Amino acid sequence: MKNSGLDLNRIIFIGRSYEEYEHMFQISNDDIVSKRILDCPGGACSFTAVANQRGGKAKSVDIAYAYSWDILYAKGKEDIKHAMEQMSKAQDQYKWNYFSNLADLLDHRTHALDLSTTDRRANPENYIEAALPQLPFQDKQFDLILSAHFLFMYGERLSLQFHLDTLQEMMRVAEEEIRIYPIIQLDGRRYPLLDEVLSYVDREGWASELVNVSYEFQRGANQMLKLSR
């Protein structure tokens, strides 16, 4: 498989579980069975795999899918190991109520990687390679877009213009709603240009709402941004 010149070392291939998505995005069973959902970027998350098992119509998009499943699986295992080593040194930056300890977190991350890899092997059409801010989809092809741990979180590395361009593309592709989690950066601070983003969203004719959620692993990561037409 071609990798489009993408440096694998620049990718962090770690995924969250379907259950985490339920809490961080307030996903209901009605959402799953009634909406066309895009996980963007999907990474090694198991949401698409489990949602489709439950009768959904979900797809994942990620620049990492330029690589074959076996290469990404090996990368994911390495990244999980490295993440656990780093988190063991900074456990006070996290709230240990959803996960009981590092071993429990390791089980969740490994299970998500296993599920997503198995599903990608079986249903490759649901895992699409793309590099934001461009998406290879038709206008309003999805009802709902979920975006976890990317926008805002990497605000120190990704420019405001990149955020706006990505949101514009998501708004083109989403017919009803976009949910983004969290609204803080890696350092735990609220994304400093969030007001500029919200002003842009308003000018584009979308409503915005900051919603408190029940999921908070990284301290302070307890809100999502909901955008709707």
Image (tube, rainbow, N blue to C red):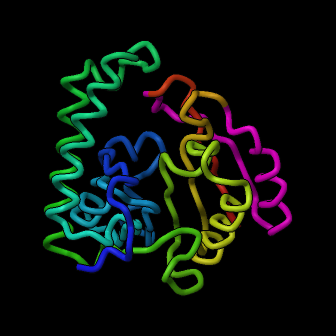
Which residue does the image show at 44% across and 74% down from the upper left?
130
Quarter of the rendering occupied by the C terminus: bottom right
Q: Which corner quadrant of the image does residue 185 belong to?
A: top right
Residue 158 vertical placement versus 169 (above, below): above
Q: Residue furthest top?
A: 92
- Nearest the camera: 134 or 221? 134
Residue 192 vertical placement versus 175 (above, below): above
34 to the left or right of 164: left
Which residue does the image show at 57% across and 45% down from the upper left?
154
Residue 44: x and y, percent? 29, 54
Residue 163: x and y, percent? 67, 58
216 in magenta: yes
Q: Which corner quadrant of the image does residue 22 belong to?
A: top left
Residue 227 vertical placement versus 183 (above, below): below
Highlighted magenta segment, given as a residue range:
190-217
Which residue does the image show at 84% across and 55% down from the upper left?
199
